[in-house]
Image: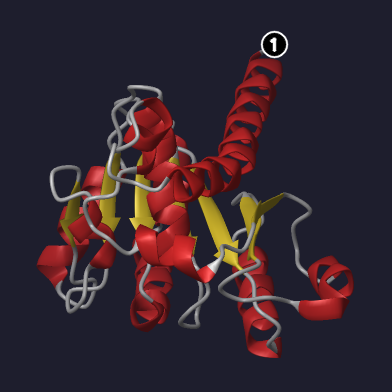
Amino acid sequence: MVFVACSPHPRSGVSTTARLLTDFYLSRLADVEGFDTDPHAPRYHELFPDRTQVIDIAAIRGQISLFDRLLVDDGVPKIVDVWQRSYDRFFKTVKEIGFVEEAHLRGVEPIVLFHVDPSETALASAQSLSASWRDLPMVVVQNEGAAPLGAYAHETLGHYPSTRRFVIGPLDGAVAKTLEQPDVSLSRLLVAPPPEMSIVIRAALKAWIAPIFTQFHSFELRRRLEGAQFLK
């Protein structure tokens, strides 16, 4: 599967989702490959320097490095962190080269992880993607810490063109600050937390991670089941 974590707006939690999904696979001792499309401040790449590469989507060389690799059906999950300033260029290129259609021909499944926020433009962008690629699966990601929807969350989400959702809960400020440290590995935290980490921080992070990883696992199982039923 190819996961495209994206939003047309900053501070919506895109890199957080890319990080969590990467750590989800690493926690299961599975291989995973990531791509960071922010060539100026590649936060995602900094967290996983050995498993990600930085892509300048505005350059032909960058497009080749990204899309040719995404089309390789090798069983390795691939995660694309789409920087908000790369959003338009990314999907314009996807359309120009027929990436979605080519991926399906090669047995590769792209999945859009669209990060919501309260704005009308975010909703319009999601609807545009859905209209452009009817057979492109979309999961709506609600990051309650980065882009809270407030009292009208249910109503707002009801307008989005997908009922599939990932919900990422908010974090206390002190706990969130710990996550900013580049040497903090969420996958290792679950198995062997660093001894110098506060037991309170450790417990809070585990409580935050657990339901998120459960959602990822459930989604993966559903996709496998749907694929098996399709082959019958």
Determine which residue is flagged by label 1. 232
Q: Name the outermost residue toward the bottom.
A: 120
Q: Residues within 10 Å of mark 1 (few under 14, many from 20)?
A: few
At horizontal 46% and vertical 66% (from top left) the residue drawn is 174
40 or 168, nearer to the observer: 168
Which part of the image, by quadrant, shows the C terminus? top right
Residue 64 drawn above or below residue 158 = above
135 or 221, nearer to the observer: 221
Q: Position of residue 64 (x, y in %)?
A: 17, 58
Q: Position of residue 42 (x, y in %)?
A: 22, 68
Q: Is residue 23 left or right of residue 211?
A: left
Q: Residue 23's image quarter?
A: top left
Q: In the rendered structure, which amino acid carries the disc numbered 1?
A: Lys
Instruction: Mark yes or no: residue 229 visible.
Output: yes
Q: Position of residue 41 (x, y in %)?
A: 21, 76
At horizontal 39% and vertical 29% (from top left) the residue drawn is 27
At horizontal 59% and vertical 68% (from top left) the residue drawn is 129
Q: Is residue 217 left or right of residue 49?
A: right
Residue 192 drawn above or below residue 182 = above
Residue 8 drawn above or below residue 115 = below
Q: Position of residue 13 (x, y in %)?
A: 50, 68
Instruction: Mark yes or no: residue 77 visible.
Output: no
